[in-house]
Amino acid sequence: MRTAILFLSMASLAIAQETAAPTPERAGPVRGETWNGYNIVNSIETGYRFAAVGGGDDAMYRSSVNYGNGIRLLGSYFTMNSKDGRGRWLDSVVITTQGLGNDPYESASLRIVKNRTYHYDMTWRRNDYFNPGLVTGGASGNHLLDTEYDMQDHDLTIFPESNLKFFLGYSGTSQTGAAISSIQPLGGGADTVPLFANVRRVRREYRLGNEFRVLGVRMNWMRGWEDFKDDTPFTGVNFQRVEPYHGTSPYWRAALFADRKIVGVNGHFTYTSGRRAFIVDETAVGPLSVAPRSQQIQTSGDAQRPVATGNLNVVIAPGSKLTIVNSSSVYNVRTSGNSAFTQFDNGTHSFDALFFQYLGIRTFANETDLNYQFSPLLGAFAGYEYSDRRIRSIQFSPQPADQTNILHDGRLGIRLRPAKGLTVLVSAEAGRNNRPFTPAAERNYHALNARVQYRSKDLLLAAGAESDYRFNSVALSSYSSQSRKYFANGSWNPRPWLGFDGSFSRAHLYTIGGIAYFESFPSQLSGSSLYISNLNTLTAGIRFAAAKRADVYVAYVRTRDEGDGRSTNPNLLFQSVQTYPMAFQSPLARLSLRITEKLRWNAGYQYYGYSAQFYANRNFRANTGYTSVTWSF
Amino acid sequence: MKSLLLLTLTALLPALARGASGYIGSEACKTCHADVWSTFYRNPHFRPPAPDKAVTGCESCHGPGKAHVEAHGGKATIVAFSELPPERILDACLACHGQTISRANIRRSEHTLNGMACTSCHSIHKARTPTRLLAKPQTELCYGCHANVRAQFSMPFKHRVNEGFMSCTDCHNPHGAFAPTWKTAVRPRMAQRALANEEPCLKCHAEKRGPFIFEHASVRVEGCEMCHFPHGSPNSRLLRRPVVFTMCLECHNGLGDFGRAGRGVPNPAPGTVSHNLADPRFQNCTACHVRIHGSNSDFYFLR
């Protein structure tokens, strides 16, 4: 037992987390306690976290890192296992927590298992997300409020190992706090600033299902209901708006699965009848905008979007070397409903009405993949996909618009295993789409991918390159995108107490698109949008344990976008937005010291530095750290 | 009496047959593998001992152990997973774990096609996570091969994966997924799906699901990644461009045969001078078009 827990302790040292706390190490040789036929292992880490932020834009720090000061339950871990696998009510309990007590990223998970009888999983997460929005007014505005996301999932499986299973589940999400609203008071000649409102959004999903086996085919169905409501109000000077937005999306899912030696079939089908009912009641009185305004807007209606989807895969393996997979998928969605938008103007006693728009998409795709293993050394694969999408809509005129686009996509590749642990992959893909929906969508594209990897017991080395080119030239506009990525990474653990890991990646992105814009009246048709990014990321880490008493981890992460190499940014309409050089770095050091067999002291420091070359007012630097004790048994 | 004898023989025959085929029971393993044996009750694979040795215990995965014991060990005398090619590891694990819908596509997944096996990510005896028997914490496992993704999550704006708030499997199914139905291309290949076979983004960003009276059609047709980098971005809100108007105008140029009606995606309010893009206040389109993902009360997404 001690050996195993010690191994767990040592093994966890290999964690190369990006944040300093919680400490991944399990304190000392955790023994575990035996109670009533169960073995219990527990570890609790609590301490103080600090953050000192400076260098300019605190809001930028909060939107990208957001750790603060205070006492935290940085992490905890609890397991209870029956030693004979015959517990009366349960055989296994696992609880983990992270960041409880006001960290911006808090989570907890619970798993309870009774062998062959039930299996329950719960996760709870909270993210205090600082909404960067438009930082306009300094420290006294709503901009410093956080939006809080709460998410939880519960899943219960009855008879998880039998041929007749039952599923019950619940998921909930809530979003509260300050977030961007859809209110924009247009001041006379001033900037247009959307305001923040205290949002109240709640999503709940309930589901139940069953899985059974008939004639060797496993069938699975699930019935669920998703409810969503948004009750964000806004009341300002001379202005108020309420816009409750409620709806439900009941759904059916069905799946089948049969895996035979030669032929396998699996499929997945869903039907969701989404519906949202809404009211917008907006009243504006007095001088609010460029001109005095006195009007009321009322909108009500309900939107419906039934979605039917299906996937069906047929796998044929006539021999041990050849596998053929044919996959079909269909997607059919219609957005329809009834709505009347009425804008009433008290001054002129006039109103405008605008009615609903229809959007329908139907997509059918069929894909065939072949895999052939010539020998243990060499394998090859090839695939072809045909996809047909039809879009119908009513936009400006009552006559529906109708368009169809067809995609042909092909790919092939080889796999090599020239030696034990060594794999090489080379693949290519090309596609032609005759009428994509947007100029920036995939039209004429090709992608190349190569990767080599060596893995042994204590060494991992990998390197690769990917390119994705998109050339979408058409008669009056053009769009071109070139993406190239290179990476190399490795980890080496020569001793149980010593390990290294590191990686380097480079991503080059070049896009150019013809655009029409307004610099003054009339519109300009000769502009183009150019964006260039050359992003390099370096990570390096070393860990070692000294005399089974101290564990040390030191790491460094640096991300730098070199842009296109220019040193200054010209104040010209397009040139000023063509590239965005910046650097983001985060060195980290962590120490964990064994005080007694059950107690450890931990400390960590992490620096965050952000530097945007052309927008120095967004820069920040932050010194963060923590000190904590870990109690384990 | 004869019936009882026959019944007893019938019950014993499988065990006798297994004995003849080399099954000896897990008790024999603990002599040499005490470290594994002593803590195996903590392993999800642990089940109380049963008469059928081929179903529970060490030999249910490692095969008959008689030859292994008689040879005093050795990887050649037993099913040693470290010596198996990926296909055989997959076969062995899927014998029990294959009958699950979430793993229905594992044999055609990108991971399998690239030569990965279950033991590339899972460690049955030396797991380093409390659940799912992962060989390392999930992000480290994924970053081990996807270093470029690690770089994306090291950006100043990113989904909170490194911070532990999210995990890769919130959006991806590492065991393979059905083809995405919301796109025409075959990519992304291993994306988890939300409610109605939608993009996984909508699992959390439910307020952007709609349906809306006025849908931003490109969101529904092309998906979120038309405007956002899903992992991380140097630009706020995970946008593909540092300044909003360039991204919007790449599509809203009014040219070509794109858009709903095939007459081009509408460009900004023709004939108006209020959109002078030389003025910085108009360069952030979403400052006014705040309901850009869809609106119930304004065709131009103004409210």
Image (tube, rainbow, N blue to C red):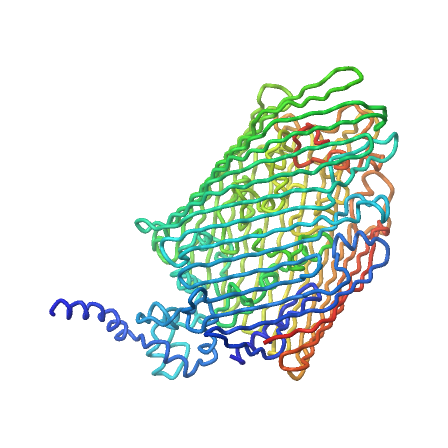
- Residue B274 coordinates in the image, percent (x, y): 82, 28
State whether residue A95 is above or below residue A484: below
Report the residue at 66% width, 82% height from top: A596
Compared across the picture, whether B190 is left or right of B262 comes to: left
Query: Outermost residue, left direction?
Result: B2
Residue A589 percent location from the top left of the image: 73, 71
Q: Which x, y percent locates residue A344?
A: 73, 20
Asked if residue A329 can be seen in this view, the reply is no
Choose between B146 and A110: the one closer to the eye.
Answer: A110
The x and y percentages for residue B216 are 65, 33
Residue A247 vs A468, above or below: the answer is above
Q: Is residue A307 above or below residue B80?
A: above
Left or right for B259, reference B16: right
* Residue drawn at (64%, 57%) of the image: B165
Residue A573 seen in the figure: yes
Query: As drawn, is A213 to the left or to the right of A184?
Result: left
Q: Residue furthest top?
A: A349
Q: Please identify the quarter of the rendering in which residue A570 is found.
A: top right
